Amino acid sequence: MLVIIMVTALIVMILLGVPIAVALAGSSLLFVAMSGIVPEIAVIHRMVNGINSFPLLAVPFFIMAGNLMNSAGITRQIFNFAVACLGWLKGGLGHVNIGASVIFAGMSGTAVADAGGLGTIEIKAMRDHGYDTRLAVGITAASSTIGPIVPPSLPLVIYGVVANASISALFIAGILPGLLMALMLAAAVTIYAHRNNIGRDARFSLKRVGYTFLDAVLPLLTPAIIIGGMAFGLFTPTEAAVAACAYALFLSVIVHRVFNAVLVAIGRAPRYSILTFRQFLRVSMDTIETTAVVMFIVAGAAIFGWVLTVTRTTEAIGQWLLTVATDPVMFLLLVNLFLLIVGCFLETIAAITILTPVLLPVAVQFGIDPVHFGIIMVLNLMIGLLTPPVGMVLYVLARVANVSFEEAVRAVLPFLIPLLGSLAIITFVPQTTTFLPDLLRSLGYL
């Protein structure tokens, strides 16, 4: 009965617009106060224990690396390279949008950073070339969900901590699903371009590809440093986050300064943005603010999850799922449907922290690989970022594109089809996620 009151209190607070972290901690505190099973001070201890994890140190560094890339204009270099490679296709800038998101996904690890950083450039470029604003917003929103699937990924870090799964394996497992999502979205853009007679936005030129590649080659090395370093055991995911942040600083301060000096020496105007101390302070404060929000959510979800565990609610839900789902296929169908609904209302980090202890033990009983299940879970919740009422990516892009939230929702609806198609393939063809980790394990790298 008290658990029902706690869950009801959580739902009411969310509907009233209370921040999700406060709603989670507040509803849990209500349960503790009413039950008297432990002193109220235990809530604080449980919240602290929930974030007292070494892998969670990766969170602020990956956030900061993405912020540094955006502030130093590195996203512009990536976008120009994508235009040179993909702009000659029909519906060129739609494909460029997807390609740039895949590249930036290997640096930021968050959908919101992708939408806020690249989205500003992409939507403006598509509008300037005569594309419908609805298409620009829809494809930008949909492609941003690739960010948390392709490594590095903040949601996968959180899942790895909660599930006690290998974060390195999760990162490697996200590569093929991320590419699959990109191909499915590219197919949707191609169909749209042919139906609406949208032409090409740039002529293919090897010279231009080579020039933009040389301009972007150092930023393009970021995913290789992160993934290669973990795959070959040079550093842990947490250390990879520090390396990504340090490399972003190196590019933003040292490399761009040297490039500008070379341009001046040969009589050309400097064109690379150099990160100033004022910008660094702003990036640092933005990172601190974002990290604090994430950690507060993790702490609130930790105490909520603890209450569900000590009351054996998670065990009861697991037993119910085992009676309803008689085989892995039925279980995965139920999980996908459930997570898609949850993603509409619950913030990603909170959903992962609360639901992983509930769903993962049942998945393991059905013989589902925890790494495979993690990718399924994160992708479901990423699709939730594109659905009202909580869809954060939609709020960001509505502001960037200067359209209403309702227009942003309508714009993204057609692109949910390729994303759901990708989800179906990833769910029922586990080799899409397990092939690369298994290969690296067989070679002794994981």
Image: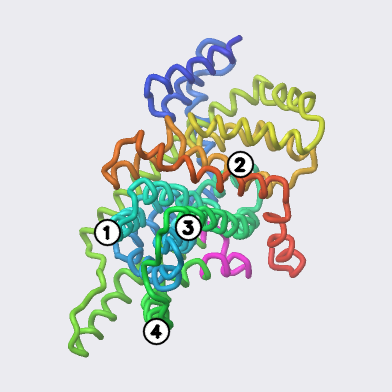
- Foreground mark, 4 or 1, reads 1
- Foreground mark, 2 or 4, reads 4
Amino acid, disc 3: His
Q: Identify the disc placed on residue 194.
A: 3
Q: In this view, does 262 lie above or below 88?
A: below
What's the distance in space between the residues labelled 3 and 4, CA to CA? 28 Å
Q: How dense is the environment of label 3, judged by Cα within 10 Å: few (below 14), some, or many (20 and up)?
A: few
The C terminus: image quadrant: bottom right
The N terminus: image quadrant: top right
Q: Residue at x 29, y 55 (%)?
A: 127
Residue occupied by mark 4: 207
**SS at badge 1:** helix
Question: Do we see residue 242 in this rendering?
Answer: no
428 relative position to 274: left or right: right
Label whose residue precedes the other's in the sequence (3 or 4): 3
Q: Is residue 231 magenta?
A: yes
Q: What stretch is highlighted in magenta?
A: 225-239
Q: How dense is the environment of label 4, judged by Cα within 10 Å: few (below 14), some, or many (20 and up)?
A: few
Q: Identify the disc placed on residue 128.
A: 1
Q: How dense is the environment of label 1, judged by Cα within 10 Å: few (below 14), some, or many (20 and up)?
A: few
Amino acid, disc 2: Met
Q: Identify the disc placed on residue 262.
A: none
Do the CB atoms of the residues marked 3 and 1 lie less than 8 Å apart? Answer: no
Do the CB atoms of the residues marked 3 and 4 lie less than 8 Å apart? Answer: no
Q: Position of residue 353 (x, y in %)?
A: 56, 36
Residue occupied by mark 2: 377
Q: Residue at x 53, y 70 (%)?
A: 224
What's the distance in space between the residues labelled 4 and 1, CA to CA? 24 Å
Q: Which residue is drawn at 72% across and 21% down?
A: 316
